[in-house]
Amino acid sequence: DGELSLSRSMINSSDKTIRKGGSAIFQHSVEGWKINSTLVLEIRKSILRFLDAERDVSVVKSSFKPGDVIHYVLDRRRTLNISQDLHSLLPEVSPMKNRRFKTCAVVGNSGILLDSGCGKEIDTHDFVIRCNLAPVVEFAADVGNKSDFITMNPSVVQRAFGGFRNESDREKFVHRLSMLNDSVLWIPAFMVKGGEKHVEWVNALILKNKLKVRTAYPSLRLIHAVRGYWLTNKVHIKRPSTGLLMYTLATRFCDEIHLYGFWPFPKDLHGKPVKYHYYDDLKYRYFSNASPHRMPLEFKTLYVLHNRGALKLTTGKCV
Ligand code: CTP
């Protein structure tokens, strides 16, 4: 049975408690957790019917010529020109081609990581995926250092690097990227209009400073395919969050997926406040209609998958 069996009632049942900010229902057992390899293979196969992460993780050079005009994935009326710089940073082949790992970590950005002591454990995984260029150095004990694959929404330029207004912002950014060595930097550049200037600046800095990062730009169909997969499994997510996208992609490459930093609730199980991000003061946004994400629903889904042995969620301390 390749279905996730996530019935609507199962998902809705704890909505109330979710709004209260976490509940005992999420106290998933970690001690008794065992990987269910049969289920892992079924999920991989069923996701492959919607997307092939090896291909959809990035467009490649031969997909476009400089000067091509494309439509934004989530805003079809608006268009983007493929610039010379962007084209020169497209990979020749998928950066994930033929890459397979025994264990992977997908690290979300929840404040639940603070004081977790999970850094060492995260770094033991064969492949570590992180989101939105989250800082690691100052938080290494809790989040680790290793970053083999890291996402960067264009908005990060504004949010964390002052919109590159000062030389020091640009230097900080270049320094952060240089620490990544030849890891994959995954930039969703074709989703919505608004970030194109930022993407161009990022591209120019990478080229000018001859940084080694391997840039990747998700295919135009990825987000629709991921949404299609989850919809088919009765998980009604209009716009999957970066974290869920990363889990979905990782099923192609990783036999065992461990999730850290997924906790979209303002309180922990003991009622203690939890920051939205472990590294900044951004506030919770997804209870309002302003946010396109449904992270609590996503979390519930991941929680069910944890209990079935398809993935391992860690929301407590690592020992
Ligand atoms: N996350 C979570 N709980 C939080 C914060 C984040 O579970 N309190 C997970 C989500 O899956 C999220 C990922 O960690 O997509 C990365 O976090 P973040 O950088 O905050 O992503 P967002 O910017 O909120 O979402 P997106 O980039 O998808 O717009």
Image (cartoon, rainbow, N blue to C red):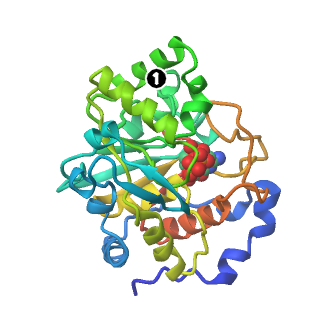
Residue 247 in view, yes or no? yes
Residue sitting at the far front: 67
- SS of the residue at dot 1? helix
- Please tell me which residue is depicted at 63% across the width and 38% down the height of the picture: 277
Q: Determine if the C-beta at disc 1 is less than 8 A from ligand 1.
A: no
Residue corresponding to mark 1:
173
- Please tell me which residue is depicted at 30% across the width and 55% down the height of the picture: 59
- Please tell me which residue is depicted at 40% across the width and 62% down the height of the picture: 220
Quadrant housing residue 252:
bottom left
- Please tell me which residue is depicted at 19% across the width and 52% down the height of the picture: 93
Instruction: Point out residue 105 in the picture as x, y percentages from the top left corner.
Output: 40, 48
Left or right for 294, reference 195:
right
Instruction: Point out residue 291 in the picture as x, y percentages from the top left corner.
Output: 70, 55
How many numbered discs sit on the rendered protein? 1
Residue sitting at the far top: 168
**Which residue occupies the foreground of this view, 217 or 248?**
217
Quadrant housing residue 166:
top right
Instruction: Point out residue 244 in the picture as x, y percentages from the top left corner.
Output: 50, 59
**16 in relation to 82, above or below:** below
**Which residue occupies the foreground of this view, 70 or 131?**
70
Instruction: Point out residue 77 in the picture as x, y percentages from the top left corner.
Output: 56, 63
Residue 118 in view, yes or no? no
Quadrant into which the N terminus falls: bottom left
Assess disc 1: are there few (<14), some (14-19) or many (≥20) residues with their C-alpha within 10 Å of its C-alpha: many
Callout 1, which amino acid? Phe
**101 in relation to 110, above or below:** below
**Which residue occupies the foreground of this view, 247 or 304?**
247
